[in-house]
Amino acid sequence: MKPNQLNIDFEEAVAYVNSYTKPLPADLLLKLYAYYKIANENKSHPGSRTPLINAFKANALIQAKNTDRDQAMKAYIKLVKKEVEKL
């Protein structure tokens, strides 16, 4: 099965973020986290050992809860282009 352009663009944006070496703002990371989990249909709970971090991650997921998979991929790509690539 040939991947569609959205999947290709999403994987490229994920690779870009994963290779990014400068610190990113926490609010941006939380948004990227939520969109990534939704895009990958990952229903597991946040797995941090720190309850406060889990709370922030859960809150980010709640804020993005009405986002479907394609919307999440598009939002992730848009955030990377708008916020990460300009840093």
Image: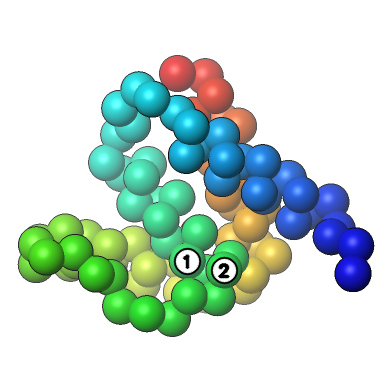
Task: Inspect this view and state whether residue 13 appears.
Answer: yes
Image point 60% across, 32% down: which residue? Answer: 81
Residue 5 percent coordinates (x, y): 84, 51
Q: Are marks 2 and 1 in contact (CB under 8 Å)?
A: yes
Image point 56% across, 45% down: which residue? Answer: 14
User: Relative to 23, is 63 above or below?
Assistant: below
Residue underneath mark 1: 37
User: Relative to 7, is 17 above or below?
Assistant: above
Q: Residue furthest right?
A: 2
Image point 90% across, 69% down: which residue? Answer: 1
Label drawn at residue 73 = none
Q: Which residue lies furthest to the bottom in this view?
A: 43
Say left or right for 80 vs 50.
right
- The amino acid sitting under disc 2 is Asn
Total numbered labels placed on residues in the image: 2
Residue underneath mark 2: 40
Circle 1: element type = helix
Say left or right for 24 vs 19.
left
